[in-house]
Image: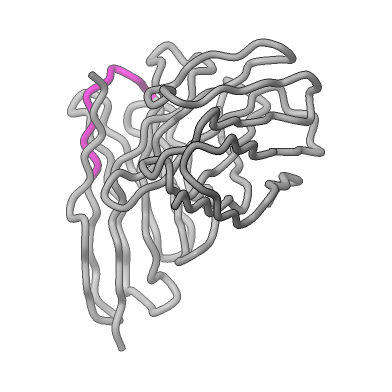
Amino acid sequence: DAGITQSPRHKVTETGTPVTLRCHQTENHRYMYWYRQDPGHGLRLIHYSYGVKDTDKGEVSDGYSVSRSKTEDFLLTLESATSSQTSVYFCAISDSLTKNIQYFGAGTRLSVL
Amino acid sequence: ELKVEQNPLFLSMQEGKNYTIYCNYSTTSDRLYWYRQDPGKSLESLFVLLSNGAVKQEGRLMASLDTKARLSTLHITAAVHDLSATYFCAVDRDSGGGADGLTFGKGTHLIIQP
């Protein structure tokens, strides 16, 4: 998985609790992304980062925040988890906008009860 | 709103047959990506098509891009069971090629039966 580690791989939590997912890369790639995958929706972009402390919203950012204090780590936080945030979350990285091939982590399966 | 539409969304075919998956998109981007996903696994990059008329081939898979028609195809030749997977096409959210991430189609779930 191109030097990308997502943690945890699986998590079950309760509605209203905060949750943080971590994406760690060893490739020193500049660009990092969080997507969620739901049946019938493909993958949808939540947030992305184009450098340390530089982040922006994607198409489904409500209820999520991110932080990137180091090149290698990109954190996704659900401030107060809801059942609609039950999903599989994928982190992706890219090193070049010339081709912009994105390499994906193994995913985190999150269930909000 | 940027749209990426794949069809069919589900395809069951026999080994040895040929078939084509279609990907239509609404952006003016010159780049298109194809990914493969096995059940319960991550996404694997298959092809990056970088300009109009681009054609890429890997084994029994061939992808092409027509930017004027805003259409990409993924052609499967003489299908084998190992090609069973879900295939996604995607385009840049920023048609100018920025860092804004990708917009994906909903995926084509392909089952190849003996």
Residue drawn at the location 46% of the way across and 49% of the way down: A112
- Eyeballing the image, is A30 above or below A92? above
The type of colouring in the image is: one colour
Q: Is residue B25 magenta?
A: yes
Instruction: Identify the magenta region.
Output: B23-30
- Asked if A94 appears above or below B15 in the picture, the reply is above
Question: Which of the pair B99/B46 is nearer the observer?
Answer: B99
Q: Nearer the viewer, residue A29 or A108?
A: A108
- Find residue B10 and report its horizontal and vertical position in percent: 21, 62
The rendered magenta stretch, by its main secondary structure, is classed as loop
Left or right: where A30 falls relative to A84: right
Query: Relative to A80, is A24 on the left or the right?
Result: right
Residue placed most toward the observer, B84 or A59: A59
Q: Residue B76 at x, y = what percent?
A: 32, 63
Total numbered badges shown on the rendered structure: 0
What residue occupies the far bottom of the structure in this picture?
A: B114
Determine the image quadrant of residue B30: top left
Q: Is B27 inside the magenta-drawn segment?
A: yes
x, y percent for residue B37 = 46, 58
Q: In the drawing, does residue B45 fall left or right of residue A54?
A: left
* Residue beneath the point at 56% across and 35% down: A101
Depth check, front residue: B54 or A86: A86
* Residue pictured at 67% horizontal, 30% vertical: A75
Picture coordinates of residue B26 (x, y %)?
22, 24
